[in-house]
Amino acid sequence: MSRASSVLNEAQKIVSNLSVEGGTLHPEVQAEHDRVVADLAKEFPQVAKAVKWTYERRNYPHFDQYARNESRGGKITGEIKIPVFGKDQPLARVDREQDMANKKGVMVPGGLRSILAHEFGHAVNHHIIRHGDDALKDEWFDKKREIADDFAVSEYGKSAINEGVAERFAAEFMGQAPRKLIPIMHSYLERATEK
Ligand SMILES: [Zn+2]
């Protein structure tokens, strides 16, 4: 099997770490989810394998739900929850709701793709912390503080250090900002997981 096809197969398996409350997603939303998660999994396979994605039906807006979840025998270490407000909404509607979830213009734009990348940025941060030793964790916390002002991309990102990381991650992943943070995160991930 070629490297490219094995990466794609791996990404496809990772995409299946998905649950949808109350049924299925609109095919357009499902396809976008699969595309974004496959893109993330190609670049961050070790993190993607540790993430579970849950789509929840909600009557009120909530957003930005990444939680540590160590309940699955150590394989899954984090869960991302994405709200969908009604049944079978097409992608354009879900994109609009994600962009409006907090306040228009407060977060990096990009609809569903943006929020999926943002939450995955939290998962990468968690992976570094979970697998790093104390010295590496201290270094990572210092690094995040050091780069926070220079790397700021949105108002929401200025609300907390880890929100700044997640927002910058999303902006860089979508090509809206130069890749400065992601290479740093890769280097910490490598150091955190090397045996
Ligand atoms: Zn966040």
Image: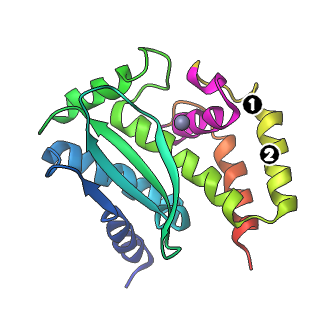
**As drawn, is 82 to the left or to the right of 145?**
left
What's the amino acid at mark 1? Ala
Provide the major secondary structure of the magenta segment: helix
Q: Vertical placement of 82 versus 130: above or below?
A: above
Percent x, y of residue 185: 68, 51
120 or 58: nearer the viewer: 58
Percent x, y of residue 122: 57, 46
Q: Which residue is mark 2?
A: 141
Identify the residue at image location x=78%, y=34%.
147
11 or 107: nearer the viewer: 107
Q: CA distance from mark 2 to mark 1?
A: 11 Å
Report if the beta carbon of the residue with label 2 is closer than 8 angstroms to ligand 1: no
Magenta part of the chain: 156-174
Report if the beta carbon of the residue with label 1 is closer than 8 angstroms to ligand 1: no
Identify the residue at image location x=32%, y=67%.
12
Residue furthest top as drawn = 104
Q: Quadrant of ligand 1?
A: top right
> Is residue 62 inside the magenta stretch?
no
What's the amino acid at mark 2? Phe
Q: Which residue is mark 1?
A: 148
Identify the residue at image location x=74%, y=30%.
148
Please tell me in which quadrant of the rendered image residue 85 appears: top left
Identify the residue at image location x=56%, y=46%.
121
